[in-house]
Image: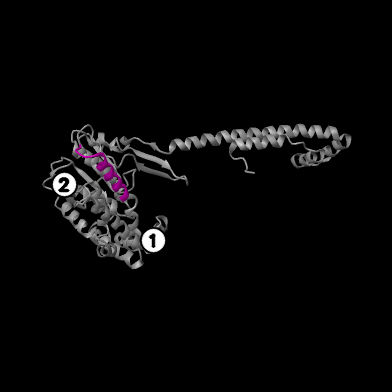
Amino acid sequence: MARPCGWGGAFMLGRNWLNKDFSAGKCRNLSRLLYGSGPSVQIGHRRSVTTSSGAERKRLGIFGKAVLLGLGVGGVYGYYSYEQRKKLLSKPASGEQFFLKDPPPKPVVSRRASIPEDNTGLKLTLYQYQTCPFCCKVRAFLDYYGISYDLIEVNPVLRKEVKWSAYKKVPIVVAEMPEGCQQLNDSSMVMSALYSYLYDPSRSLADLATYYPPLVSTDDKGRRRTDIMNKYFLMYGDKDTKRTKDDIKAERSWRRWADDVLVHALSPNVYRTPAEALQAFRWFSETGDWERHFAAWERLLVVYVGAAAMYGIGKILKRRHNLKDDVRESLYDGCATWVKELRKRKTPFHGGERPNLADISVYGVLSSIEGCDAFKDILEHTKIGDWFYRMKSAVNNHEGCRSVV
């Protein structure tokens, strides 16, 4: 028979236990356990078994009631704690918490992307790791739509460049405005908020950011997690998008796929062997110009300690995301899935004749490994190369600044 669970079950067990017909011997043994077996107990027993049994029952009743009371209070408290935890789960915080009245302390700018065609009026600073796939997504978005920005390279070990921020992950985009600075977190939220602004500049970024509040939750191990609500949604307002609902839904779906599926195949492939891990970090150092931005000891620490650490982490991620024994096959599968979708559409890009945010997301993720052996292998073993280099040309030539639809 199944054992009763929860505080209600405990209450039933306690009640049944109290209703049991205890013999004098059992009561006496329990009494000795609870109160001792000294002379007073022995004398009381000699006088009358009936009197002793009655006294013991009375004591037992008091004890049982105390147990029941404890179970009841404990059960109510447990239920209250559970309800409070449920309230914390999926509890949106205010997006206004990331509106900064004063600009954050800005270290030396690593690079300025100044685009002559930029007429957005935005003054943006991107805090990033050069080869982080999520940061690559944001850079691809800004470059494609011709938006100028300052770039701050963050030391991936010390991260002193973002000590000012309560949100510690990258990318972080800070938009300077007359009334203050709006901090945008999470690559997909950054893309959605900025695209919504480009689509309708009459709305401020600060106002648009309120549609993407942080979602604070606690996982099964009690660890605090933060995600962003609505991060794949574009805020079109009442304007005619000239797009079908199916098209908008598909774009959202493939953006999510890039974040939830494709990106998880990267680390186990880039750090597949110790040699590949070291090669990757040396390329990260070269493409991120770490020699200029970081002290020599910081750069060497990141390259060698980072490569060793990520080799081990890559193995953990392989198991966590159920990749194939040969992790290259999982990466090839991801690329083949995307190519199949493009073929089904029979257009140069997922967005048709020009890229949409799904194209930019997938391109950004794959561009993060462009200098690694894994990238050379996907060009050789899949048919993704033609689309990738079409995207690269569109991004580098800022083709999106001509129109936003």
Please give the name of the residue rendered at 21% of the width and 56% of the height, measured from the top-left corner: 387
The image quadrant that residue 35 belongs to is: top right
Q: List x then y, in percent, for residue 137.
A: 25, 50
Amino acid at dot 2: Gly
| Residue wearing tag 2 | 400
For the residues labelled 2 and 1, the Cα–Cα distance comes to: 37 Å
**Which colour scheme appears in the figure?**
one colour
Q: Label 2's element?
A: helix
Q: Is residue 383 visible?
A: yes
Q: Is residue 108 visible?
A: no
Please give the name of the residue rendered at 62% of the width and 40% of the height, measured from the top-left corner: 4
The image quadrant that residue 65 belongs to is: top right
Q: Residues within 10 Å of mark 1 (few under 14, many from 20)?
A: few
Residue 247 tag number: none
Earlier-in-chain disc, 2 versus 1 = 1
Q: Label 1's element?
A: loop
Q: Residues within 10 Å of mark 2 (few under 14, many from 20)?
A: many
Q: Magenta residues?
A: 241-257
Amino acid at dot 1: Lys
Residue 324 tag number: 1
As drawn, is 305 to the left or to the right of 123?
right
As drawn, is 295 to the left or to the right of 315?
left
- Foreground mark, 2 or 1, reads 1
Q: Nearer the viewer, residue 245 or 378?
A: 245
Q: Nearer the viewer, residue 329 or 96?
A: 329
